Amino acid sequence: MRLLLTDRFCERAKPAQGQTQTDYFDEQVSGLALRVAEGHKAWSFHFTSPGNGKRARLTFGSYPATSLGAARTRATEAKALVEEGKDPRSVEAETFQAVCEDYLRREGKKLRSLDWRKGVLERHVYPTLGHRPIAEIQRSEIVRLLDKIEDRSGATMADRTLAVIRKIMNWHASRSDDFRTPIVKGMARTKPSELARERTLTDDELRKIWRTDAGVFGRFIRFLLLTGARRNEASELTWDEIDGGDWTLPAARNKTKVDLVRPLSKAAQALLPAKQGKYVFSTDDATPISGFSKFKAAFDKASGVTDYTLHDLRRTARSLMSRAGVPSDHAERCLGYVIGGVRGVYDRHEYHAEKQQAFEALAGIIERIVTGTQAGVVQLKRGKR
């Protein structure tokens, strides 16, 4: 299907009726197409190969990570290569995005934060540097990219992005005879000591947050406090992961790459809405809750509690477990940490009963804080070993 692509169309595009995927060709840049499938949109450039005269296809990013404007630029550059008698697929092999994808494919199994790194690259890096030949990327380009990220998402996000870029460029340098990374010391925006956080909510702040009615996001905040889950673990929670009172976080979504069973407390279960759609926390019954910065800004204004991150709620939950008398090992397992050493290798007891007691104890101390009753230490029963 051929038409003049617009941002509005790309955002709303769906496969044509009766098709699992549809290519929408751009009238402005010939050969450029947006391939739309259920839940995924990707850019491609269709051309006649200079080598054998056969039709070929070059893919170079997903939408919206790669914008319409960036896709047109990429397609125009590829078209110029074809006119020079070159196959853009071979040139593409040395772009920064191609190197990144090769790195993730070869090293991904070793990375606990694989999905997070992919997200950083797609959101912050590919739209600006993805199409650039890696050998031509200059230090000043990276600095300007970091400036942009810092202005939009903060210095910490800029430094985390720099760390991802540095790792990939060093990896590529170790495999190349000629490449030298343009990254040097002094490009970071923060000091390591500034990144360490110890913030937990005070009892007064917890009461204010708990009493703030903010619809889906308010329930999401309370769920994070009652489970100690990471933001994306909870936001992408699907109904398929819940069985009775247990939430099983699959290895594919867990940072430690193992299944994690969280026995939900009665208070946490009470926050679950009526089953509708795929995701438990959703504003449209089709996609997981997102737009956290916007939601949190409004929530902070309504609650009067500021200067905390969603990850600080996880730290708060862990601290509250200690106040409730939960043994350290049980609390660590509730949060999904892997116990190290010999015990971590040979102790295969899943601690389901102990985790269930721990989450109920967490819910209990939160209730006492919120209602203003005495928050004493809870004596936990010892599970059978």
Image (cartoon, helix red, strand yellow):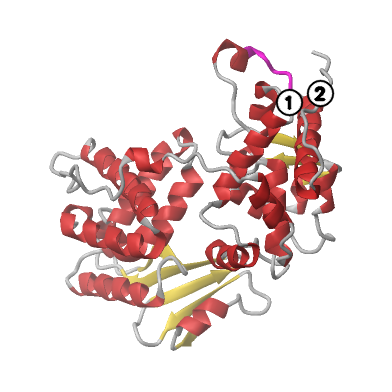
Q: Amino acid at mark 1?
A: Gly
Report the magenta stretch's main SS: loop
The answer to whether residue 89 shows anywhere in this view is no
- Answer above or below: position of 359 versus 55: above
| Location of mark 1 (residue) | 325
- Answer above or below: position of 91 versus 242: below
Residue extending furthest toward the left: 178
- Answer above or below: position of 65 versus 264: below
Q: Position of residue 360 (x, y in %)?
A: 81, 36
Label 1 residue SS = loop
Chain-order first, disc 1 or disc 2: 1
| Location of mark 2 (residue) | 380
Q: Is residue 19 left or right of residue 7?
A: right
Label 2 residue SS = loop
Instruction: Name which residue lies at 24% across and 62% down.
Output: 144
Which of the pair 156/253 is nearer the observer? Answer: 156
Is residue 331 rendered magenta in the image?
no
